[in-house]
Amino acid sequence: MRKPASPPIVGILEWFRPGEHSRVAQVMADLHTLGVTELRTGVSWADWHTREGQDWYDWLLPELASHVNVLPCFLYTPPSLGLASKTSSPPADPRGYADFIDQMITRFGSCFDWVEFWNEPNNLREWDVTLDPEWRIFSEMVGGAAYWAQKRGKKTVLGGVSPIDPNWVRLMSERGVLSFIDAVGIHGFPGTFDYSWDGWGQNAGRIREVLQQCGCPAEVWITETGFSTRRHDEQQQVREFVNAVEADVSRVYWYSAHDLDPDLPTVDGFHLDERDYHFGLRRADGTPKLLFRIWASGGLKAVREAAWMGEPARIPRSDERPVLITGGAGFIGTNLAHRVLESGRSVVLFDSLARPGVERNLHWLRKQHGDRLRIEVADVRDPYALRRATRRAAQVFHLAAQVAVTTSLTGPLFDFDVNLRGTLNLLEALRAMENPPPLVFTSTNKVYGRLDDISLSVDSTRYEPIDPHIRAGGVSESRQLDFHSPYGCSKGAADQYVIDYARVY
């Protein structure tokens, strides 16, 4: 992979549905927080043919342009104008698309400098090649539109190919389309859709080689890439982002700002592929993922520096077996890890880094103890990651949890998945071992209800029981259980599973 002359410009890709005014405001606020000034978004020719669509774009494009530099991707045939009645159909008259582009430049030309033609034209769901077997209609349509857009003073982008196909780009050159193209887009989703992946260096290099052979000076852009956190592996999203922004290309557009609304369908239909719903920097409920938090707090430099946290812990094949601490990046976990490491033992710290700021604890521990601290940035909801982490553990401290009663009230399913299913995942990982290590599990007083009968006093730092016996020894384990709140239910049920697995297995 050749070293790029300069880092690529980094932008965000986000599609908006007509009427999503509040979501536009949210995305603009997030881009401002991240310091991002480039946005790629779709402009639907099909929607433009509706009254609602025209009103929407009359508002949307000037609004976006007041905040960021916009790359509009013009796509989707109006069903009434297609060879077939669907948005992926070629238009019956290819010149209609150029007329649409001309109209948009006339009306909104001050809002953008670049124009992108279609999206993933070698993807059947975006361009129905069965109706245009050799892309002849596409070549005529885009060639004419690109020629006219350049005449109108705009720079042009050929819609990103997915999968990346140098032969398709060569075909566009043979058809004369590349004569009017200033940048060629490529798309890739390593680890999510592209399981056979040669890296951005080779993929971008193949496209660049074709352009050089064809005498085309166009730039190579990554117009769409991202990583789905469907399996809660947010650390991998960080790594794939770093891989993309270090590619030898001129621009990178990362998909996307927000997870898709789980109540809305995708292009393929309603929830046909769960991966489609988890590409965002924020979850559907608005909470930020790891990549967003690091990017917002320290910029792209901090994201690049944090990539090491995404590397799976590699436990050396030695006689020493490490101590495993789940949830180890929190306050208690960090201090426990520090104490164990000071004793000379090694530690595997397993944490999803879901709580803002805890990554600073990892930097502190690594600075204090070096390579004897192994970090596995993963989620207890991922049973495969837990099996990998427990494989050689000598002891396990299970601190990982959703810890807020308030969060359990607003998101009881999330609370259940982390606290109960996550604990059961760990227990199953230990049960599968021939000689499982001992486990210490941290619970909560919420399994005992409100504890109204225990009087408390307040000193300068905390509440304490007035009864000296309770203050010294805590609440008796003989006390009747009375789970309060979804949090109390999930932690209490996890208690029972731990006790029963110890008894049965």
Image (spheres, rainbow, N blue to C red):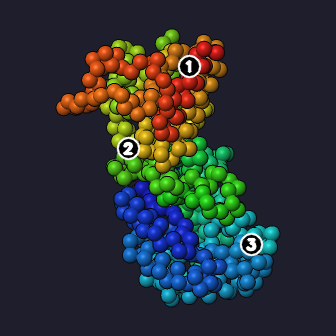
Q: Amino acid at mark 3?
A: Trp
Q: Amino acid at mark 1?
A: Ile
Q: Position of residue 423 (x, y in %)?
A: 55, 29
Q: Nearer the viewer, residue 306 or 383?
A: 383
Up/down of 499 relative to 191, above or below: above
What residue is shown at x 28% (from left), y 29% (from top)? 456
- Report the Cα–Cα distance between label 3 and label 2: 49 Å
Q: Is residue 48 left or right of residue 375?
A: right
Mark earlier in primary sequence (2, 1): 2
- Report the Cα–Cα distance between label 3 and label 1: 64 Å
Please name which of the two marks, 2 or 1, marks the residue nearer to the observer: 1
Q: Amino acid at mark 2?
A: Pro
Up/down of 321 relative to 105, above or below: above
Q: Is residue 95 left or right of residue 344?
A: right
Q: Is residue 457 left or right of residue 282?
A: left
Disc assigned to residue 499: 1
